[in-house]
Amino acid sequence: MARKKKNKPPIDISLAELVAGLTRNQRLLGLDLGTKTIGLAISDTGRRIASPLETIQRTRFGKDAERLQAICAEHEIGGFVLGLPLNMDGTEGPRAQATRDFCLSMRDFWREQDLPAIPLAFWDERLSTVAVTRTLLEADTSRAKRGEVVDKMAASFILQGALDRLRLSADHPSTASPAPEDDTGDDTEGDTSD
């Protein structure tokens, strides 16, 4: 008997497509994938602010994927923004390929768990760790403290860049426009001037 092939979603989609597929309360999870750690940052439900969440100490893929799955369930994650470590000339090297391989493995892991794959968009992460490290140095953060927070701060830097792009982007007007207006004609909602 032939094995039924499950439909595989694309490994990555545009940022605008990613956000367009989210429900109102879903958040984005930013990832800074390293060889020893995965820095995580989370957006607010309005998808305007990125906050550092945690750093996963990488052990084996299955354990890392289970932790990501738990975080996604706990925080209503609807999509990933994953830093893609491009070379300075914009080409992809071995680290970018390792990042793409991680994404394929995540998709396969979630298929094996019978969970829908969470869509992701890549974001150019060139110099994100350098920028975060410089900021931490300017704040006179100790070397030990920098080591503890740099990965999740880099994930936050990556995610905030994507959120800022969405907010300012003409190719995704729904993030730049305000919430739909109330058509009841009552414009006193939230007025505390009495």
Image (cartoon, grey):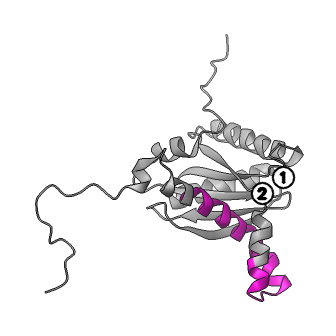
Work out which quarter of the rendered image holds the C terminus and state it: bottom left
Does any portion of residue 7 appear in the rendered image? Answer: yes
Answer left or right for 170 relative to 5.
left
Q: Where is residue 106 in the image (x, y as percent from the top left)?
A: 70, 43
**Front residue of this view, candidates 25 and 189:** 189
**Front residue of this view, candidates 83 and 40:** 83
Looking at the rendering, the stretch of residues picked out in magenta corresponds to 135-163
Q: Residue 88 carries which label?
A: 1
How many labels, in total? 2
Q: Which residue is drawn at 18% across and 71% down?
A: 189
Q: Is residue 102 magenta?
A: no
Q: In the figure, 2 relative to 179: above or below?
A: above
Q: Position of residue 176 (x, y in %)?
A: 42, 55
Answer left or right for 14 relative to 2.
left
Q: What is the CA distance from the residue labelled 2 to the residue labelled 1? A: 7 Å
Please tell me in which quadrant of the rendered image residue 35 appears: bottom right
Q: Earlier in the sequence, mark 2 or mark 1?
A: 1
Does any portion of residue 23 appear in the rendered image? Answer: no
Disc 2 versus disc 1: nearer the observer: 1
Q: Residue at x 84, y 48 (%)?
A: 89
> Mark 2 — residue?
126
Q: Residue 188 carries which label?
A: none
Amino acid type, mark 2: Arg
Q: In the figure, 74 relative to 115: above or below?
A: below
Q: Where is residue 192 in the image (x, y as percent from the top left)?
A: 20, 82
